[in-house]
Image: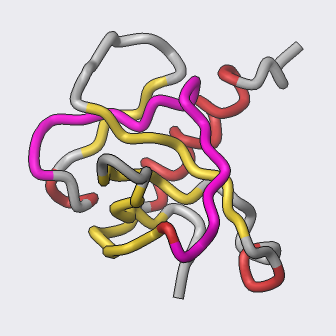
Amino acid sequence: MIARGDVWDADFGPIVRPVVVATRQTAIPVLARVNCVVVTSTVRGHVAEVELSRSHGVLEPSVANCDWLVNLAKDRLVRHRGSLDPPTLRRLNAALVVALGLDT
């Protein structure tokens, strides 16, 4: 089962990379696609990034880059890696507000 805040490996065709599911929980069961934040090891230190660690299922220091959003078919999520803890999910929420310009 896919849940908001889960970290999954996503099949992007030529590559597989981690993502964090950002779609609201109540919508996930009825949608064929989910909105995801791409995880990257390129850390720039800006406000739309959320630091992730091994406890979230990533193997190296990484960030969820909320400026890099993708909409994926659920069957593109191929391996569950982990989940965000509540404080990190709150930081993801705040970073999405900034990235999407919802704070104005």
Q: Position of residue 44 (x, y in %)?
A: 33, 11
Colour basis:
secondary structure
What residue is rendered at 55% in x and 59% in y?
A: 21
71 is higher (above) or lower (below) than 43? below
Q: Position of residue 22 (x, y in %)?
A: 62, 54
Q: Position of residue 30 (x, y in %)?
A: 83, 82
User: From the viewer's perspective, is 30 left or right of 86?
Assistant: right
What residue is rendered at 22% in x and 30% in y?
A: 41
What residue is rendered at 45% in x and 41% in y?
A: 38
Of residues 16 and 7, the one nearer the viewer is 16
Counting the numbered discs, the total is: 0
90 is higher (above) or lower (below) than 62? below
User: From the viewer's perspective, is 100 left or right of 59?
Assistant: right
Q: Quadrant of residue 74?
A: bottom right
What residue is rendered at 41% in x and 53% in y?
A: 13
User: From the viewer's perspective, is 34 left or right of 74?
Assistant: right
Bounds of the magenta segment: 59-75
Q: Position of residue 85 (x, y in %)?
A: 40, 61
Residue at far front of view: 14
* Magenta stretch encompasses residue 12: no
Looking at the magenta stretch, what is its main secondary structure? strand
Residue at far right of view: 104
Q: Quadrant of residue 61?
A: top left
27 is higher (above) or lower (below) than 47? below
* Magenta stretch encompasses residue 64: yes
Q: Quadrant of the C terminus?
A: top right
